[in-house]
Amino acid sequence: MSNVGKIRLKTFSELQATAEISLRIETDKTKPTEDNGHRTPEKKSPRKSRAATTARKSKKQEGNLGVVTVTSTVKRSSKKTPLPGQMRIDAFFKSASKNYKVETPLPPISSSKKISPPVVKRKEPAGAKGRKRLFDDSTTTSSTTSTWSDHKPPQKRVQPLRSAKGKENLSELDVIDLCSEDDDERTIKEEERTPSPVKASKQVAISDQKTNSASSKPTSPEGSNRSMSLLGMGSNVSSPDIGQGLLRSTPSRKTKEIKKPKTPPSTNSKRIKKPTTPPATNSKQRKPKPCPPYKVVEGTTFCVDGFQFGDVAGVTHYFLTHYHADHYIGLTKKFSHPLYMSPITARLVRLFIKVDEKYIHEIDVDETVMVDNVEVTAIEANHCPGAVMFFFKLSSGECILHTGDFRACSEMESLPLFWNNTNIDLLYLDTTYLNKNYNFCHQSESVDRALHLVGAFIEKNPFKRILIVCGSYVIGKEKIWLALAEAFSLKVWTESSRSDAISCLGWDDLQVVLTDDPTKANLHVIPMGKISYPSLVEYFSQFEDQYDMLLGIRPSGWEKNSKPSFGKKISTIGIEYSEHSSYKELERFVRFLKPKRVISTVPVGRDLFVTGDVPKIWYQYQGPASMLSTGFQRSISTFLTTPKRTVPNASASEMMLSPLKESCSDHGEEDSMECVSIVSIKSSVSENTNIGACPIPEKVHLSETRGTNNKGVITTRTEDSKEAIKMKDSAKEPAIVRRLTSDASDDWLSYS
DNA sequence: GCGATCAGGT
DNA sequence: CACACCTGATCGC
């Protein structure tokens, strides 16, 4: 698999070389234009960066040229799962390779130096003070937070409750239930969410308030009074406005219970608290849904990916992790709060949502900015282009990571940010695939598979003119179709909206293969939902005179065991391709970070308040493994202290810095040390492709520089440098490297 | 008519 | 499964 980048794939035309002539004849016959697929043969672009995700990545590769890097080759071909995480350490060194010299370690640097100190503090404009309403309809009372109590105007929009999934009405029920809820697994969650007693007390107070005023909230879920979880916002809490937002969900199964019955509200009796509940009267405004607690970062007034909840009480700054509908939903051009996101996402937001520029703040990957006295750092999320995770370091020193949607990869374990902030107090985690059954291959492998399947299809249908159609979202899945385009020299067409979105990505490789004329492209990228037989039949009807067959490709994490469907004209194949972490990747990532608490940000069912349960065993260690004297991962310490490292020959270039390898995973910690001996270093530049799309390593650094962002605000930006070397040495300092604690590493891969 | 939300479907 | 949309219906302005 790793040979992905080495395999020389035949281009579309080559595969059908023999058919070409006849093809042309046919074409002439049918259509004069005959652009049938013989796309720019000249464009045999080397499918170099198949794995490249963004321009950033490609840059990195260039930068690495000629540099000695430590790389690892994950053997995944033979085995079903790649275990990309195995590349971890090597990836780190690779990224730091620019200045890294194995033989001459530099003196350790003081930890103080490394972290990018807050540089400039930036107070946000509209910030704290005037909280504006998310929706201008300020006129209408409902939205305003203050309306909690007075909010009587029921909802105007009395949509006939369609077979209410029970959600709406039930929600309130939940509220009540919550109170009475007995403890179960959920309790744990609750505890987690309510760490300090102080906070708890506040919550109570708040909840009380709510309950009283809650009555106003009618049938809508918003009405549900859940205890508030806005922690750390003391002052705000007291304000009357508080009501709306963060309600603490008590996920309780009750919710579930209630929901399941889909029955109408009749059962609402549970909802005691709500006093006078104005049924659906003529409320003018729709109330936004209640904001689940995990949308607001504890200890801050920041809301992440929460735009559909109106003006969340106490929230002063909003963050958008990436441009996918389920995350920006609710964000409209009327939005009027400071909004932070990556440059790519910002471009998309400007283009499609048209949020007022004055509210848009960009945080580039690996850039740190001060927001309301909190250090905020954006980290590449390895999800879709522009997707980032946000790392918050509060003035109190508390560290909180919000992953947004992400696909954990080994490179993330190399981020100096994590090495320098070993104590993650809270982790908001994307648990989309938090199920042992979800275990998919590395993206690069998926790409290989796609190339193989498509190549085989083309070869098996020699004299056919084939239109390839790949499913995609507005953003995401680019790696698949880009690889196909480059490998088979195809021109790509997609709808104007997606084309516009692509132009926001700053990904030149994509731009190169795109064309505006669908008749001149034999690879079309269309909405994922249209990659179904009936839809494709219809789609193909417009191109039947130009093509003989259509091959639909559906890249998704759900296509793991899907079987291809080959028809006379329409064929479809599913490609297992995920932009979310697999179960194992999640586990490894959590074990790596070892946060004190973990809160899932992915609802399990329809109820936004009920999210997944992250196994505590992943981050709460009790066993002997956590008591190792070294205080840090043996593998890396061993590596760093090894005076002489040998560079194995190519065949043995496999890198196993992680103490565990597949063969060892079943054994226990005892074997870990043995595995460490497998560590090897290899000078390589091209293996980056294995990483799929994780540009992270490019920015490994510990130093920082200051500059100004597009807003003229001074920011902190770390740059790679010799600091990277220092980092290596500093690894000897438990205080700094503790991140990779042995306990975690030892059984990192020993899933079962 | 456009914007926005929501339910339902894929 | 439930990703990340789509589509259609319903309202509001």
Image: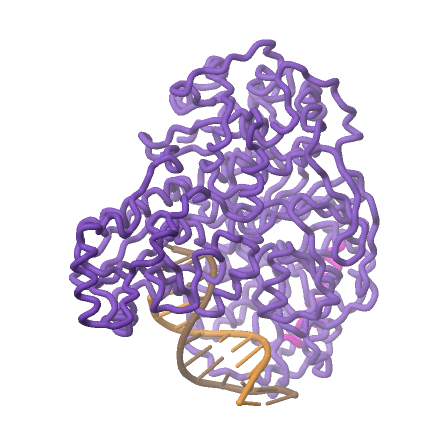
Chain colours: A purple, B orange, C brown
Dominant SS of magenta comes to helix
In magenta segment, residue A214:
yes
> Residue A585, image x and y in percent?
47, 38
Q: Quadrant of residue A733?
A: top right
Q: Residue at x 83, y 56 (%)?
A: A123
Answer whether residue A272 is visible to the viewer in this image. no
Left or right: A237 as drawn, with respect to A20: right
**Among all residues in the image, which is located at the extreme top?**
A643
> Which one is in front, A748 or A509?
A509
Q: How many marks?
A: 0
- Above or below A682: residue A390: below
Answer whether residue A535 is visible to the viewer in this image. yes
Query: Quadrant of the image for the N terminus of chain A?
Result: top left
Q: Quadrant of residue A440?
A: top left
- Above or below A392: residue A269: below
Left or right: A482 as drawn, with respect to A404: left
> Residue A617, image x and y in percent?
52, 33
Q: Residue at x 80, y 39 (%)?
A: A117
Query: Quadrant of the image for the C terminus of chain A?
Result: top left
Q: Quadrant of residue A317?
A: bottom right
Left or right: A596 as drawn, with respect to A21: right
> Residue A505, image x and y in percent?
56, 56
Left or right: A355 as drawn, with respect to A78: right
> Residue A474, image x and y in percent?
48, 62
Span highlighted in magenta in the image = A202-217
In magenta segment, residue A357:
no
